Image (cartoon, grey):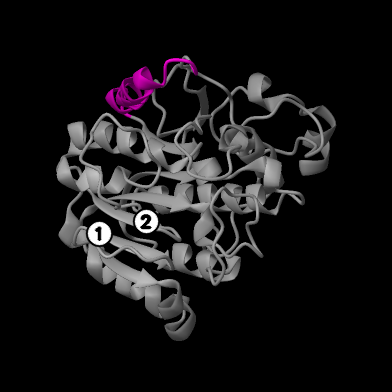
Amino acid sequence: MALEDAKTQVDQAFTRETSHGLSYENTFGGALSFARRRYSKDLSGVDLAITGVPFDQSVTNRPGTRLGPRAIREASALQVFDPPYGWDGYDPLSSLSIVDYGDLAFDYAKISEFPEALIAHVRGILEAGAATITLGGDHYISLPILKAYAEKFGPVALVQFDAHSDTWVDDDMGRIDHGTMFYKAVKLGLIDVERSVQVGIRTVNPDTMGIATIDAREVHLKGPVNTASKIRDIVGNSQVYMSFDIDALDPAFAPGTGTPVWGGLTSAQAAIMLRDLAGINLLGGDVVEVSPPFDTTGATAIAGAHVAMEMLCLWGWTRR
């Protein structure tokens, strides 16, 4: 059946007639969308909306993450032929109604208007009854997204994979900075600090705003299985938002990012932890800081696409 489908499937981003199912379109051809899902602004009956936020005007080092959503979509074409490995046959692409909602539209020259534009974008998706998996973009985008989620669900537990805590002190709420947004999120009451955790940290910041930290060294020494268990203990039954900064991975596995730091997680460790988090009450998530100009082999975008797919699995696992 797959071979027959491969002969006829092309441009599934526009031609697929359903928001369910695997795809057998050639990886090297066709219009790009995340996991060959159909582009749609109609969210009737949709479970998950994949959306891109091509914004990188708040970076402190190397830019380029505005091109991240496009690269992640391209890399995701490798993942649509079979159910994700390691999930006991569970296939979110077939069991969930998933669309690619496209990218956020915003005026790149009016940066001050960007936060409200993103809040409204995500709010509209949530009001339609769908959840979001967002492809960044730099890490600042998590703050407006969290504001939209907190409007609907109240404070959420944050599971953050990152090399940096991103809780540097910044009481100017008008500043747009990808290193201070979780400081602001705590100050604004968007995060349930007691149920939140940062994983993979390996840079110094004396104030994590009370959020638990599992640094990269601990992951290496105690292993990903024990780490996942600790994360589960921290979040408990809370409603969780997951933010995965691709620089949580070591530059050997994800060189295409703006602020790489050595000593990071391996892709294998990340895969084990994400799969072992099955059962958490995930509301939504984002994958950020993929910078294609520095991603010479495409490995970073591939990692980002896999993380996004694991988030689809995590979201759907408790809703089977």
Query: Do we see residue 22 in this rendering?
Result: no
Residue 12 has which mark? none
For mark 2, give the secondary structure: strand
Tag 2 residue: 160
Quarter of the picture containing the N terminus is top right
109 part of magenta stretch: yes
- Of marks 1 and 2, which one's residue comes earlier in the chain? 2
Tell whether 203 sits left or right of 282. right
Q: Residue furthest bottom?
A: 221
Q: Which residues are magenta?
A: 108-129
Q: Residue at x 35, y 48 (%)?
A: 319
Q: Residues within 10 Å of mark 1 (few under 14, many from 20)?
A: many
Task: Determine whether 262 is above or below 184 in the image.
Answer: below
* Main secondary structure type of the part rendered in magenta: helix
CA distance separating discs 1 and 2: 8 Å
In the rendered structure, which amino acid carries the disc numbered 1?
Answer: Ser
Tell whether 204 sits left or right of 193. right
Give the x, y percent position of residue 184.
23, 42
Tell whether 227 sits left or right of 1. left
Q: Residue at x 45, y 61 (%)?
A: 163
Tag 1 residue: 196
Q: Residue at x 40, y 42 (%)?
A: 178
Give the x, y percent position of residue 166.
35, 52
Q: Nearer the viewer, residue 135 or 78?
A: 135
In the rendered structure, which amino acid carries the disc numbered 2?
Answer: Gln
Q: Nearer the viewer, residue 96 or 118?
A: 118
Give the x, y percent position of residue 234.
24, 67
Task: Determine whether 124 is above or below 83 in the image.
Answer: above
